[in-house]
Image (cartoon, grey):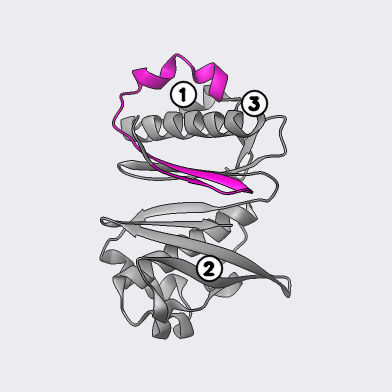
């Protein structure tokens, strides 16, 4: 399980794995790194099973690095992952062949990894406001990072009531670079929360995460 990227901050650790292993590599430790190992039985697609196993194994490893031990990863009714018996916060994403896991010491967090696919340009009006579309200017890079950012904020929020065009707002989409940061706002019940976003591009993928 080669480590592709690891970002260590005083508040969080973010790791990206290039997933090349078979399921058998993880299965023996399943009861250690998952607090609900029976959930694997609900997944029937081989790639998804490997991503589930890898992400829990990676989250468990990061949590142990931060706290010295970890009782495993579980997911709530909104499919938001948590670290059992810990104040650490976790977010998970995967886009073949990568798996990304972000563990924050105190704050709810979000990470998203995406392949830059042309179909995002066709879907953009469904998740970007007209102002955001104008800022993105038809750029695939900006559109993919926009989608990843809204996904990361959705995961941070952790509940399913958000509508991307009505609750999450992005700025600076006209200044997208290889690596950078974005201003974003989450607006729920007329309460606006500013969320710091960082992004990276590598190959044909983008990585977006909250800080």
All told, the count of numbered labels is 3
Direction from residue 199 to residue 186 in the image, left or right: right
Q: Secondary structure at mark 1?
A: helix
Contact between labelled residues 3 and 1, with CB atoms less than 8 Å apart:
no
Asked if residue 22 lies in the magenta stretch, the reply is yes
Give residue 82's position: percent from left, percent from top: 63, 38
Say if residue 10 shows up in the picture. yes
Q: Which residue is denoted by mark 2 in the rendering?
A: 164
Q: Position of residue 7 (x, y in %)?
A: 48, 47
Tag 2 and tag 1, C-beta contact below 8 Å: no
As drawn, is 156 to the left or to the right of 182?
A: right
The reply to whether residue 123 is visible in this rendering is: no
Which span of residues is magenta-colored?
5-33
Rounded to the nearest angstrom, the CA distance separating label 2 from label 1 is 31 Å
Pick the front one: 164 or 2? 2
The label shown at residue 130 is: none
CB within 8 Å, label 3 to label 2 = no
Which quarter of the rendering shows the N terminus? top left
Q: CA distance from mark 3 to mark 2?
A: 37 Å
Q: Which residue is mark 1?
A: 41
Q: Residues within 10 Å of mark 2 (few under 14, many from 20)?
A: some
Tell us which disc is closer to us: 3 or 2: 3
Q: Secondary structure at mark 2?
A: helix
Q: Which residue is mark 3?
A: 68
């Amino acid at each position: 399980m080669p480590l592709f990227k690891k970002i260590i901050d005083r508040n969080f650790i973010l790791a990206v794995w290039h997933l090349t292993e078979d399921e058998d590599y993880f299965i023996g430790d399943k009861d250690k790194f998952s607090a609900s190992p029976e959930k694997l039985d609900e997944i029937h697609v081989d790639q998804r099973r490997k991503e589930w196993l890898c992400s829990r194994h990676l989250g468990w490893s990061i949590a142990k690095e931060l706290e010295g031990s970890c009782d495993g990863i579980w997911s709530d009714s909104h499919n938001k992952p948590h670290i059992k018996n810990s104040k650490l916060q976790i977010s998970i994403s995967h886009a073949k062949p990568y798996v990304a896991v972000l563990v924050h010491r105190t704050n709810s967090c979000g990470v998203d990894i995406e392949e830059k696919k042309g179909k995002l340009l066709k879907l953009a009006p469904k998740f970007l406001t007209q102002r955001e579309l104008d800022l993105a200017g038809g750029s695939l890079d900006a559109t993919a990072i926009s989608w990843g950012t809204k996904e990361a904020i959705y995961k941070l929020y952790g509940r399913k009531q958000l509508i991307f065009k009505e609750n999450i707002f992005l700025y600076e989409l006209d200044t997208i670079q290889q690596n950078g940061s974005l201003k974003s706002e989450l607006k729920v019940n007329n309460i606006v929360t500013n969320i710091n976003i960082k992004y990276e591009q590598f190959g044909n993928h983008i990585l977006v995460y909250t800080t």
